[in-house]
Image: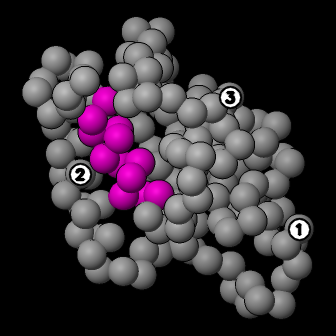
Amino acid sequence: MKVLLLVIGKTDESYLEQGIQKYVGRLVHYLPFEMKVIPDLKKRKSLSEAQQKTMEGELILAQLQAGDELILLDENGRQSSSRAFSEILEKHMINGSKRLVFVIGGPYGFSEEVYKKANAKLSLSAMTFSHQMVRLIFVEQLYRALSIIRGEPYHHD
């Protein structure tokens, strides 16, 4: 199984980028992983919220392939523990999912078209984090989940 993390806009802070790269380096030992950055929209400030969501949605949907499982990282998504997240991943592995695509949207969330295409929504916390911090939190949780699946000592219950 492959995992793709789609994000809108580049990471501005070097300390976040360093943390992200630390966990991405670890992830590739478990499965094929790619983090793809969809560039920020041009002249974004002149666009309405709805226009931004629609345009970003088109860019997100253009990245999908047949058979992809689309999971949105969304504040209204289902929350789970690290262990429960590992169980979700393991089920996808056992069921033969070809590629899981996780998406961190732009500042206003996702378009209706993206929500309709999604197979699931996942929330990392009831708290709100910057979209850039969510990248680091997600790749760490993905690494944690994979280490749980393998029975490695990274995670402590």
Which of the pair 13/94 is nearer the observer?
13
Q: Quadrant of the N terminus?
A: top left
> Can you say which quadrant of the picture contains the C terminus?
top left
Under tag 3, what secondary structure?
Answer: loop
Residue 144 position within the rendered picture, expressed as x and y whole percent measured from the top left = 27, 35
Secondary structure, mark 1, is helix
Q: Which residue is mark 2?
A: 23
Residue identified by numbered label 1 = 50
Query: Along the polypeptide, which appears first: circle 3 or circle 1?
Result: 1
Q: Main secondary structure of the magenta part?
A: helix
Query: Quick one: 94 or 62, which is closer to the camera?
Result: 94
Between 117 and 128, the residue placed more toward the observer is 128
Q: Is residue 127 left or right of residue 156?
A: right
Q: Which residues are magenta?
A: 134-145
Q: Residues within 10 Å of mark 3 (few under 14, many from 20)?
A: some
Give me the residue at 66% from left, 66% from top.
106
The residue where tag 3 is placed is 119
Q: x and y percent of residue 18 in the render?
A: 23, 69
Whether tag 3 and tag 2 are in contact, CB under 8 A, the answer is: no
Determine the CA span between mark 3 and mark 2: 25 Å
